[in-house]
Structure formats: structure tokens, C-alpha cells
């Protein structure tokens, strides 16, 4: 992630004096470190870049002599907790804030669809316990110099435009209660509502956006960020163009998912957005979110970026999985990309991400059994593919090599299950990994012509289940069997049917 560094072969004292000098730069979060034998000079552009410089000094090593220049390619980089199903706990959110600080992300958008105070109960103020927990989040974000954005979603429990003044008053009172605990950044999300109805109410929508924006300006707060009903290119028709045209002359920030709801970063989609809106998009990246595949987890490399690596967007927020600890592998990769887009290396970065969250390298070695997001499925030429070596040997019908590859992965799975270092991560994923183990063993037994034992092993995969919120509910827990990796199922079914 470091833009420019020159390390000299000398060692320096650990108790050297550090001097600071504030400078000007048009680069985002720019800083320089001049680490000499006897002293260290840090040049910074903001309090945030000063913090980043000190973190970078720790990462490189205080006992080293070096010259370093660093800055981000994208100004606003962050996480949006915007998924459906079981929300994160406040402890998990605080943990993610600390991780974001570690990888130089600077904005957290709070928008969990199944927090009723964000969504269905948007008219109600938080109860005292929830408000206190939210304040702890806000206080931590302030301490870490991370912008905490609180979003309201008056679209599913619909804002009543026939009672506009009363509804607006209620919404602004909700904001005021959150300003009182230190929140300075707000968003208004009108996504996932009927688009024809939104078109009929387009002028009312604009009035709502502008009234909220006026409220924020009066309170000397940041610009309003919105999600509009037409938040991706696939949904933009003539009606959507009229809706966008109404917002061209405003200062509000608009979020955009790209070509579709689930879409990689795409230059053409971003340029399309700029053409119809007069603004650069703020990307809501629906990866690695798994609320549309609640029986799955993703450990994929991030290669869903615009191949030009051009800055065709203003900001980017990654929407993570219900599994907070596991999401760090993806969040790390996004952070690395946004910091240095031109020099981002897919394979190196995902390995570094795994090393950061799990000391046992076995997890990285089995991770390509968990490639199944919609973005992965639509990627025609992935650099790393699902169960790559196993599948290649199967396609070649080299069953001796297939057995070796399956046996090796079984060994790695057992290694992870036995010697994992990150217990929080283990608790989130062990059911999925155990399921993988049973499926691999079933394949291995087929290769040994032990079909009865193979059937018994495969039956064990059906017992591997997790609890989720049932789709279209915000509190109805149901058990769901975890999904099997597609390619391994293909291999198993072939071997079983050709016994």
C-alpha cells in the first residue's frame, strides 16, 4: 500500500525525537516521513494524515532509516453496513471501526436494513440503551478520526407525503437526537421502494432531499448523502432520467451501485451516471455482501475493479457480509485498492489479507472453495478460480492427481480446524469449513471405490446449518443448510454416478 519508499541499510535509535510540520498538498491524506539516524521528520496535511504517518512509521519500523511518501487515490473510502438479515452487534461494529483505522479507511455508514430504528421504526427515537451503544460507536469513530454517517430509510415504512410537514418534523427530530450524541454526517436512503411510485413523487422526493440538506447546512454539518430509487444503470429509463435531472443542480451526494444491483466497478457505468446526474458517483459496492446468499460465505480475491484503474468515481463504500470478522479479508483488499489503484496486485493483496486475520496459512490454502458471489460468477476470466487445481485435474480426468489434490485440501482443512489462531473468525465460519471437509472426504472415498462410506460422509453435509433471518423478515430466525461449493458437487455427482 505504500506509494514511495526508499529504505537505507542503516539502523537508528528507537527513542529518536519526532518533529511535525503541517504542509499543503492536493493529494488525499498526503504525508511524508523522513526517518534519519538521529531524528524523524513527519510532514502532514491534516490530523488524519498525521495519524496515518504514525501508523506507517510503526509498520515500516522505527529502527529503520528511510524516506517515505504516501497518499490515497480516493478521498472518501469506507464501509457501509447496509445488508439485510442479522445485523452486527455493537461490539462487532466497534471492532470493524478499529480495523478500518488499521487499513486507512475513513468513513463508516451505518445503515443496517434490519435495525428497525434505521428502517421500519424510523419515526421512533432510539431507546436509551440503543442510543448509549450508538454513542459509544460515534465516540470511537471520532477518536479514530473516522467519519460516522448515520442513514435513515423512510422508504419501506413509507414517508407520507400527504402529511409532509409532520413527517419532515419527525425525521429532523430523529436527526437532532443523534446530533446530540455527536453524529455530524447524515444520509437519507430511498432505495428498494416502488420505482413507479417514486416517479410520481419525484418532486416531493426532491423537496425532501433539499429540506434535509437545508437543515444540515443550518447546523453546519456535512452534505447530505442519498440513495435514490434508481441507483443502478439497469433501472434507468426515461422516468429515471427525469428524476436524475431534478437533482443536477443540487449539492447532495448520490450513491450508485453501477451496472446493476450487484456489479463490479465499471468505468462506462460511472460515466453514464455522470452524464445523467452531472456528478461523479459515490459507489455502493455490493461485495462481499452475502444477504442474497445467506447460506454462503465469500473468501474471494478482489478483482472486481475497473480494468483501466481510472478514478471515475468520487468515493467507494464496501457492503460487507453478515460475518464481520470474515469481512475483514475483503475490506482489507478494498482499502489497498483505493489507496493505490495503479499498483494494486490481486494475488499479493489477498495473501496479505489472510495473513492479517489468521496466522495459520491453511485457511488461505482452502479459501478458493468459497468463491461463489454473483460478482465472481460473472467474472469470465478470474485470476484465481474456485477449487482451481482440483477442478483442473478432474477436467483432465487425471484421477490420480485429483486424489492427491483432494487429499492435500483435506489436510489443510484439518489443519485450520485444529490450529486456527482467530477464534472469532472460527466461530463465524467453522460450520462452512466442516461442511467442506465432509464433501472432500466423500469425494476421496468415491475415488477409493468406497461408495457406502462416501454416501455416509455426504449425508453429514446436510447436517451443517446456520441460523439466518428468513428473507423479507427482520426477526424470524430459521435454520438453513450451508451451500456446497459448485465444482466439488459436480465432481462428487460425476464420481457417484459413474461408480
Image: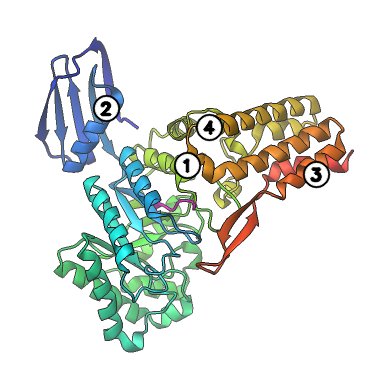
Name the residue that disc number 3 marks.
493
Judge by depth and name the residue closer to the eye, 10 or 142: 142
Label 2 Cα neighbours within 10 Å, binned few <14 / some 14-19 / many ≥20: few
Q: Residue at x 24, y 52 (%)?
A: 139
Name the residue that disc number 1 marks.
424
Name the residue that disc number 4 marks.
420
x and y percent of residue 203 in the render?
33, 81
Task: Name the mark nearer the viewer: 2 or 4.
Answer: 4
In the rendered image, the vertical position of residue 397 relative to residue 470, given as above or below: above
Task: State which quarter of the image contains the C terminus.
Answer: top right
Label 4 – label 1 distance at C-alpha? 10 Å
Chief secondary structure of the magenta span?
A: loop
Task: Name the mark nearer the viewer: 3 or 2.
Answer: 2
Task: Name the mark nearer the viewer: 3 or 4.
Answer: 4
Which badge, 3 or 4, comes first in the chain's sequence?
4
The label on residue 58 is: 2
Label 4 Cα neighbours within 10 Å, binned few <14 / some 14-19 / many ≥20: some
Which badge, 2 or 4, comes first in the chain's sequence?
2
Label 1 – label 3 distance at C-alpha? 34 Å
Amino acid at each position: 500500500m505504500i506509494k514511495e519508499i526508499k529504505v537505507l541499510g542503516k539502523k537508528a535509535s528507537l527513542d529518536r525525537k519526532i518533529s511535525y510540520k503541517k504542509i499543503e498538498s492536493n493529494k488525499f491524506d498526503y504525508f511524508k516521513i523522513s526517518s534519519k539516524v538521529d531524528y524523524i521528520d513527519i510532514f502532514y496535511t491534516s490530523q488524519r494524515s498525521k495519524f496515518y504517518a504514525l501508523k506507517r512509521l510503526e509498520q515500516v519500523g522505527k529502527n529503520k532509516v528511510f524516506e517515505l511518501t504516501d497518499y490515497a487515490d480516493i478521498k472518501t473510502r469506507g464501509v457501509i453496513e447496509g445488508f439485510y438479515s442479522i445485523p452486527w452487534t455493537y461490539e462487532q461494529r466497534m471492532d470493524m471501526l478499529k480495523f478500518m483505522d488499521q487499513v486507512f479507511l475513513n468513513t463508516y455508514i451505518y445503515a443496517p436494513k434490519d435495525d428497525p430504528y434505521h428502517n421500519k421504526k424510523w419515526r421512533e427515537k432510539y431507546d436509551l440503551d440503543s442510543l448509549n451503544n450508538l454513542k459509544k460507536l460515534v465516540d470511537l469513530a471520532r477518536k479514530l478520526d473516522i467519519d460516522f454517517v448515520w442513514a435513515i430509510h423512510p422508504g419501506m415504512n413509507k414517508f407520507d407525503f400527504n402529511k409532509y410537514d409532520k413527517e419532515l418534523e419527525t425525521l429532523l427530530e430523529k436527526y437532532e437526537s443523534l446530533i446530540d450524541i455527536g453524529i455530524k454526517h447524515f444520509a437519507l436512503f430511498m432505495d428498494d421502494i416502488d420505482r413507479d411510485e417514486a416517479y410520481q413523487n419525484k418532486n416531493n422526493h426532491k423537496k425532501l432531499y433539499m429540506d434535509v440538506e437545508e437543515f444540515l447546512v443550518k447546523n453546519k454539518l456535512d452534505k447530505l448523502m442519498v440513495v435514490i430509487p434508481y441507483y443502478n444503470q439497469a433501472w434507468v429509463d426515461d422516468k429515471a432520467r427525469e428524476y436524475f435531472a431534478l437533482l443536477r443542480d443540487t449539492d447532495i451526494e448520490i450513491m450508485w451501485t453501477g451496472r446493476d444491483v450487484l456489479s463490479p466497478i465499471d468505468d462506462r457505468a460511472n460515466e453514464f451516471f455522470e452524464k445523467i446526474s452531472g456528478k461523479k458517483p459515490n459507489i455502493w459496492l455490493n461485495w462481499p455482501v452475502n444477504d442474497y446468499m445467506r447460506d454462503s460465505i465469500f473468501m474471494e480475491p478482489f478483482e472486481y475493479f475497473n480494468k483501466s484503474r481510472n478514478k471515475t468515481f468520487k468515493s467507494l463504500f464496501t457492503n460487507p457480509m453478515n460475518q464481520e470478522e470474515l469481512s475483514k479479508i475483503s475490506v482489507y483488499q478494498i482499502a489497498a485498492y483505493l489507496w493505490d489503484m495503479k499498483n494494486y496486485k490481486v494475488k499479493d493483496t489477498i495473501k496479505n489479507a489472510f495473513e492479517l486475520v489468521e496466522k495459520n496459512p491453511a485457511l488461505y490454502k482452502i479459501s478458493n472453495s468459497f468463491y461463489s458471489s454473483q460478482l465472481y460468477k460473472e467474472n469470465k476470466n478470474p485470476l484465481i478460480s474456485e477449487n482451481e487445481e482440483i477442478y483442473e485435474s478432474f477436467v483432465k480426468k487425471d484421477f490420480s492427481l485429483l486424489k492427491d489434490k483432494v487429499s492435500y485440501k483435506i489436510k489443510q482443512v484439518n489443519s485450520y480446524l485444529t490450529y486456527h489462531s482467530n477464534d472469532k473468525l472460527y466461530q463465524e465460519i467453522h460450520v462452512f469449513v466442516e461442511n467442506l471437509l465432509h464433501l472432500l472426504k466423500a469425494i476421496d472415498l468415491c475415488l477409493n471405490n468406497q461408495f457406502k462410506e462416501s454416501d455416509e460422509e455426504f449425508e453429514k453435509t446436510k447436517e451443517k446449518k446456520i441460523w439466518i433471518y428468513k428473507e423479507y423478515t427482520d426477526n424470524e430466525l430459521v435454520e438453513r443448510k450451508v451451500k456446497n461449493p459448485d465444482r466439488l458437487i459436480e465432481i462428487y455427482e460425476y464420481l457417484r454416478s459413474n461408480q
